Amino acid sequence: MSRIHVTTTINGDETEYLCEPQDTLLDVLRDELDLTGSKEGCASGDCGACSVMLDGRLVCSCLVLGAEAEGRAVETIEGMASGEELHPLQQAFIDKAALQCGICTPGILVAAKDLLERNPDPTEEEVRYWLAGNLCRCTGYDKIIRAVLDTAADMRGAA
């Protein structure tokens, strides 16, 4: 099989890579580009651990082929911080102990950031609904939901 040449933008940077036709975007991110923040939890789109933004849309990167990123914009957990400065959601997850093993955390953070960009004042029900595609086996979600709601309030206050 011949490899496919892909030119895309990842976290704002023009990026090129070669991939096999069957390689998922998750495989490419982790194995070809050494962006290992996105995790493989299920490989079937059920857990959300591999969530990334693709052209402004939240997707499970295990369900997208690497070749499908051609000419598109990908945002991963690695692009969430600004240099050494964490995104407010990342800091809140640390401050509020809203993580444990860390497998689900990158996907939840990417999804939560997308939510807050779309809706800066979500209700608890809206946060729970938005994050329903991200499964966590460790925390029980309460600290995660609280971290998202508190960050939303803090970001509204700072705006």
Image (tube, rainbow, N blue to C red):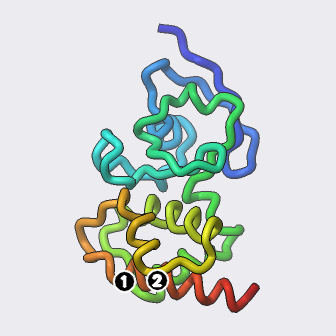
In which quadrant is the C terminus drawn?
bottom right
Q: Amino acid at mark 2?
A: Ala
Residue 80 picture quarter: bottom right
The Cα atoms of the two marked residues, 1 and 2, are separated by 6 Å
Residue 90 picture quarter: bottom right
Please tell me whether residue 132 is drawn above or below residue 24 in the rendered image: below
Q: Nearer the viewer, residue 47 or 116?
A: 116
| Mark 2, other Cα within 10 Å: few <14 / some 14–19 / many ≥20 | many
The residue sitting at 47% across, 52% down in the picture is 51
Residue 94 - label: none
Residue 141 placement, left or right of 74: left
Provide the secondary structure element on which disc 2 rests.
Answer: helix
Residue 147 - label: 2
Residue 65 placement, left or right of 140: right
Residue 87 location (% of width, % of height): 62, 74
The residue sitting at 52% across, 88% down in the picture is 150
Q: Nearer the viewer, residue 100 or 125?
A: 125
> Mark 1 = which residue?
143
Residue 84 location (% of width, % of height): 67, 73
Please tell me whether residue 70 is drawn above or below residue 122 in the rendered image: above
Q: Amino acid at mark 1?
A: Lys
Provide the secondary structure element on which disc 1 rests.
Answer: helix
Residue 117 location (% of width, % of height): 64, 67
Q: Nearer the viewer, residue 153 or 143?
A: 153
| Mark 1, other Cα within 10 Å: few <14 / some 14–19 / many ≥20 | some
